[in-house]
Amino acid sequence: MSDPAPESSPASASRPEQSATGRLPASPGDLPPPEQAAPGISRRRPATSNLSVAQSGALRRLGLAPAGFVLGTVVMQVVSSAGYGTMAGGYGAFGTTGPSRAAARYPCAHMMGYGADHWGYNIEDTAYAASLSYGYETAVTRLRDEARTLGAHGVVGIELTVGDLVGGYASWTFRATGTAVVLADGPPPGEPFTTGITGQHLERLIALGYAPATLVTAVGAMYVQPNCRTRGDFTVPGPVDQIPHAIGAARDRARSALHQAATAHGDGVVDTRWSDRRSPAFGEGWIQTAVAIGTVVRRFDTDRTPAAPRPVVPLRP
Amino acid sequence: MTGPTRSTSPTPDDSTPGSSTPGGPTRSTAPTPGGNGAGGAPTSDPSPSPSPSVSSDPTLGAPEIPLDPHAMAQRMRAALAVRHRPPAHSAQVFASDLTVGDLVLLDEVGYQPVDLVSGAGSASWNPQMASNQGGGDAWAWALTAAITSARSAVDRELRARSADGVVAMQLHLDRHPGNLLTCTMLGTAIRAQDPAVTSADAGHAGASHQGARHGHSSRSAHSRAAGPFNTTLSARDFHLLVRAGYHPAGITVGAAVVGFASRSVAQGMGLSRENMELSDQTGALYAAREQAMSRMDAEAKALDADGVVAVTFSERPSHSMMVHAVEILVVGTAIRRGKDGHQSLHPAMQLSLDDPDPNVFLRG
């Protein structure tokens, strides 16, 4: 068998990496053992994360390295103030003698004095809002506990989900996931910060001079028992007040909770993911919910690194 | 964002910065705009950026400003350290649903968030009344009323907070049941950082050097006396609009419902054998469109606007044995031009060397 090709170095047969010039190793025996092929491989245990490559790169530019993928879960029995306990609880579903003074009442547009489907009211559903708040907050607390045991300075990219994982009526699974991060040569880790922000967005937040403080979950819920006009009864068309009032009241509650959290922990709230939901309840009634999940931030530096964004038109095929 | 880029060729003409000199900290990594562009450019730059054309915006000639990792790690340390100090517990906290990118873009044109503002409006109508010509007015009225009352609610909240306007407003229309429309609006109220440059009486554009780095001439297009503006434009689009010398005035709406009668019961049930145009329905479409557009036009004129942008156009038929109608709804943002007119941005062309998304070819 002739020599495949002359090599510049006489020891080339035992230096397969020189075949990077294009020649394949002549036989499997020519392949370098793993330690030689990549001498830098570390033997320490790698950290898990749910960061994308770009996010990981941005965090590393901030000096942050992932400490581990962290998770917090809780299964809750969600209750409503205006649910099954309505009759016993004193709100009253029937007639005009129903809800307490705390409810906003919407009389029948036909000027009829009777009939539960003609009279309506809105009342705050404090139990429902408390169930949701407790579920979200407990999930985040457990996630933060995991991060603390990892010695993390904070948790980024937190996603909160609610699902029907376990099954059963009104039992919801609240789940929080995120990546715990550690600042290299940082101060001793205390209480980790929590935020839904991650990657390049966190980089830009720091450049703006804001520090993430804590994730905040704000919930507002109103039980709506619609009157005839609110049901869309076309014999009495016109402006409908009950729906905007319910939406406004639920949103107001959530917004106040955001303000309270901002006042207690920082200077403002950013990156708020907001959702308004209508959950069907008794008969034609529903629970109007507003849920806001945001990050409280604190200003640590008034000097901002300018961004100077440039408009660019991409030439795509 | 892979690293610093430098323009390796000098700009063809000396682009003198206009009266709007950017404020803020000096950028030590950039060559002086308008000066000798080759002065600060290293010859061994592996990834030269295309040199942008002449423009009046000085930052367009400057290369991308990198975030220095060492400085950023220092800032991260300071960000962690601040948590050991007790918070101010001030009453002036802000709440917003802005992303960090939105915050940066608004900051660059001189606006800061104030609070979340919300509005909702709801109205119902009798759909049977749309079965003859002109009977759609109650329906169109209900659409407009729901959106207008949501808009007024937002306006009240803006005035209560002394905000200049609201940007990136989410506007949802919910038709449940079919003859009841609920309009909800939610957005972040913003305020200009330097009040002097917002008033139209403040004088020449570019009066402030402490304020935004961009968008000075659009300030003349918005006066606090005219009332707060609202828009569904995203923070990114708002940033571009303001840099181009315009300012949003408000959301404008035009709704029209035109009913038409079938020629015969047979035609109404689709039993006609002839291949013919259904001219009543075509006519109804044209009429509805004209009415909707002219109503939106009237709202824009009332706002003293120069144009309407970002218009969404929705057309909704309603057919049953009794009711034949077309509903057309147009919603847009009215804008005003600043006294310096249109400011060209001269966007740079960019060609990515990455493989395009496979969907690009599938979409055609």
Image: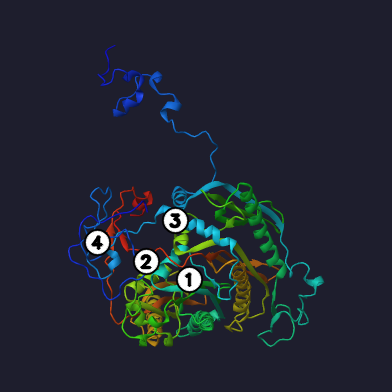
The amino acid sitting under disc 4 is Pro
Residue A307's x, y, as percent? 38, 63
The amino acid sitting under disc 2 is Pro
Please give the count of numbered marks on the rendered protein: 4
Residue at numbered disc 4: B52
Residue at numbered disc 1: B269
Residue at numbered disc 2: B25
Q: Which mark is residue A163?
A: none
Q: Which circle's residue, 1 or 3, is located before the other in the chain?
A: 3
Residue A131: quarter of image? bottom right
The amino acid sitting under disc 1 is Met
- Give the residue displayed 27% in from the left and 47% down from the top: B46
Residue B106's x, y, as percent? 42, 70
Residue lying at the far right of the rendered structure: A88
**Marks 4 and 2 in Cβ contact (< 8 Å):** no
Q: Which circle's residue, 4 or 2, is located before the other in the chain?
A: 2
Q: Are marks 2 and 1 on the same chain?
A: yes
**Marks 2 and 3 in Cβ contact (< 8 Å):** no
Q: Chain of mark 2?
A: B
Residue at numbered disc 3: B72
Mark 2: which secondary structure?
loop
A251 or B42, which lies in front?
B42
Q: Are there few (<14), some (14-19), or many (20+) residues within 10 Å of tag 4?
A: many
Cα separation between marks 4 and 3: 28 Å
B175 or A89, which lies in front?
A89
Residue lying at the far left of the rendered structure: B12
Closer to viewer: mark 1 or mark 4: 4
Residue B260 visible, this orientation: no
